[in-house]
Image (cartoon, helix red, strand yellow):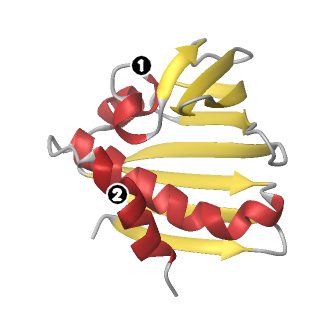
Amino acid sequence: MPLIRRSIDPVLERVSLTWSMPVLPERVWWGLTDPEPLPHWLGTLAAGEFATDNIVRIKHAEDYYSVSTILDCEPERLLSMTWDFPDEPRSVLRISLSSDAGATQMTLLHTGLGAETASYLPGWHTHLLYLEGLLAGRPLDPAGFWGTYEQLAAP
């Protein structure tokens, strides 16, 4: 399984996932930051570009957007950004990449989630399954997203 570990810390209001992607870091970086693959696993880039100090706006559903400030952007290594959704506290998402014998180890750390902490762990797990499928050339059916989320969220 590509998931190496996942954890939740409700006290510190954070989730963390470490994942092994079966592709090189440049391909993972493409998946994380290029407008073409984003709709297959996260949402549609509506405005901006992934570069330090830029603001990006991502459409996740009809009339539902996140607005993020890129805090740090080191291609093929690190993406750090605020994560602003309506009706949620501002949080910070940090994704780091490292090369691992022809694959990429990705560590996602999302902090400051407040009352939303518990829902973000299965949410990111689901999103990363979709990213991995896309990068491996086996994109997952978008219609199955919420069913997958519900399975991962079940106790």
Looking at the image, which is closer to me, 108 or 43? 43
Task: Nearest to the eye among marks 2 and 1: give it.
Answer: 1
Residue 57, given in percent of the width and then of the height, sits at: 63, 21
Q: Are marks 2 and 1 in contact (CB under 8 Å)?
A: no
Identify the secondary structure beneath mark 1: loop
**Along the horizontal axis of the image, is 24 left or right of 31?**
left
Q: Which mark is residue 72?
A: none
Identify the secondary structure beneath mark 2: strand
Q: Is residue 47 above or below residue 68?
A: above
Q: How many marks?
A: 2
Q: CA distance from mark 2 to mark 1?
A: 22 Å
Q: Pick the quarter of the image with the N terminus.
A: bottom left
User: Residue at 57% of width from left, 19% of height from top?
Assistant: 50
Q: Earlier in the sequence, mark 2 or mark 1?
A: 2
Residue 59, given in percent of the width and then of the height, sits at: 55, 28
- The part of the image, by quadrant, that contains residue 150 is bottom left
Which residue was labeled with disc 2? 20
Which residue is most to the front?
A: 62
Q: Is residue 138 above or below residue 57?
A: below
Residue 85, given in percent of the width and then of the height, sits at: 73, 39
Which residue was labeled with disc 1? 35
